[in-house]
Amino acid sequence: MTRTPAIATVQIDNDRVRVTEWRFAPGTETGWHVHPVDYVVVPMTTGELVLETGDGVATNELTAGVSYTRVAGSEHNVVNAADTEFVFVEIELKPAGL
């Protein structure tokens, strides 16, 4: 299934971090990708996002302001299957010298 891409706006990109705001209109997705570095997600809205991985599909309930972290290397696609916009800020933690 082909979906419209979510809107990614890079706010900061330097030697140490990349900070990206992700805006998901209903039915949009990130597209399949792998994070090369560890990262933190800060939800700005409360709601559900669908996570597609090689192991299957899961629905995750996220709460505004309740952050979580993931390690590098997981291939996935994030989808907003809800009928309202979802927004989060992603902070990728770059190792020194990357």
Image (cartoon, rainbow, N blue to C red):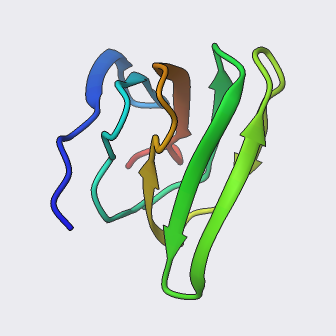
Front one among 38 and 65? 65
On the image, the x and y values in percent for residue 3 come to: 20, 51
- State left or right for residue 46 relative to residue 3: right
* Vertical placement of residue 3 versus 57, above or below: above
User: Measuring 57% from the left and 82% from the top, which residue is drawn there?
Assistant: 56
Q: Position of residue 19 (x, y in %)?
A: 45, 23
Which residue is located at x 56 percent, y 64 percent? 72
Q: Is residue 40 left or right of residue 90?
A: right
Looking at the image, is 78 positioned above or below residue 24?
Answer: below
Is any part of residue 68 visible from this angle? yes
Answer with left or right where residue 64 lies relative to residue 92: right
Image coordinates of residue 16 in percent, x first then y, are 49, 31
Is residue 73 among what the camera can see? no
> 68 or 82: which is nearer to us?
82
Q: What count of labels does the image hold?
A: 0
Residue at far bottom of view: 55
Picture quadrant of residue 27: top left
Q: In which image quadrant can residue 7 be found?
A: top left
Instruction: State left or right for residue 91 relative to residue 40.
Output: left
In the picture, the quarter occupied by the N terminus is bottom left
User: Measuring 66% from the left and 39% from the top, which residue is drawn there?
Assistant: 48
Residue 70 in the image: above or below residue 45: below
Q: Position of residue 38 (x, y in %)?
A: 60, 52
Residue lying at 67% horizontally and 56% vertically, measured from the top left? 59
For residue 70, which quarter of the picture? Answer: bottom right
Q: Give the camera-side residue of 6 and 80.
A: 80
